[in-house]
Image (spheres, rainbow, N blue to C red):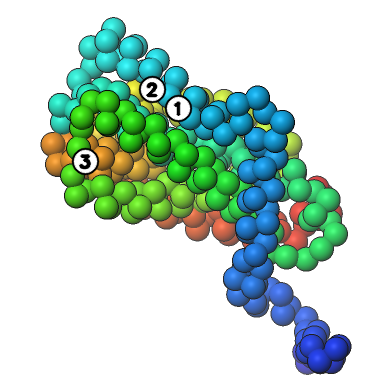
Amino acid sequence: MRTIKKTIMINQTKLVIEPGRAEKNYFADLWRYRELFYILSWRDISTRYKQTFIGILWALIRPFLTMVVFTVVFGKLAKLPSDGGAPYAIMVYAALLPWQFFSSSLTEASNSLVGNAQLITKVYFPRMIIPTSSIITCFVDFLISFAILVMVMAYYRFMPTLNIFLLPVFLLMAFAASLGLGLYITSLNVKYRDFRYVIPFVVQFGLYISPVGFSSSIIPEQYRLLYCLNPMVAVIDGFRWAIIGNTTFIYWPGFILSMAVTFFFVLLGIKKFRSMEKSFADII
């Protein structure tokens, strides 16, 4: 079959009309529409804190109170050991940072397409921009929450090691896990609205099965590799290793497994999202 390609000049701008052109240039369009990332992210940030009483402090209060509760319950009452002899509060908060970023990103990304239904039905742009921009918004909250960690470390007079410079690597893993699962779930959420009720439960359940309030070293050795099927286990252990230092250790077989699981979900999420993207405007 012959492909019909038509070129039109409008005000010195070349407009190319060709079947399947948007499909072939999809990922190039992600870069072309990069300003849309900024616009949508800034809109979400301003909307989140608009007309709130204490505004941006919510990003500090939530992880701080969670850290206090986990430190009291697991550190003081349950007497669970800390990683590398670090203060229990630092160990917990080093895990809360990536977990809050992941859980917020997953929640926001899963509802992002439904929340932008009017935009999707009116204009063309790569739809992947919408869930990705919601993750960028959660990254801003992560940076704000990081200030609490600095204050806690100053309170305990705890100095990080040079491992701290590898923290962006583990943050990138958290971003990849959020994006992969977020793309997959938001695709299903467009068609099956029940998922908006399932996600809060999954996130809450994941908080307790992930090593946030405790060290993953307490998991029995025979179950350690199986436990690392949770991609956030490697991310949390990596954050603790980067923040606490070499006195804590990374379980490398589990770390590699978690990376493989994360990569699998990224590919699965992109594939599922792209397969359903053409029908979003019709069923949303």
Q: Amino acid at mark 2?
A: Met
For the residues bearing labels 1 and 2, Cβ distance under 8 angstroms: yes
Of the two numbered discs 3 and 2 in the rendering, the one whose residue sits closer to the viewer: 3
The CA span between labels 1 and 3 is 20 Å
Q: Amino acid at mark 1?
A: Pro
Residue topped by disc 1: 63
Q: Earlier in the sequence, mark 1 or mark 3?
A: 1
* Residue at x-position 45% and y-position 27%: 63
On the image, the x and y values in percent for residue 216 come to 26, 30
Residue topped by disc 3: 160
Crowd around label 3: few <14 · some 14–19 · many ≥20 (10 Å): some
Disc 3 on helix, strand or loop? Answer: loop
In the picture, measured across the screen, residue 283 lies left or right of residue 82, that is right
Against 197, residue 244 (above or below) is: below
187 or 1: which is nearer to us? 187
Residue topped by disc 2: 67
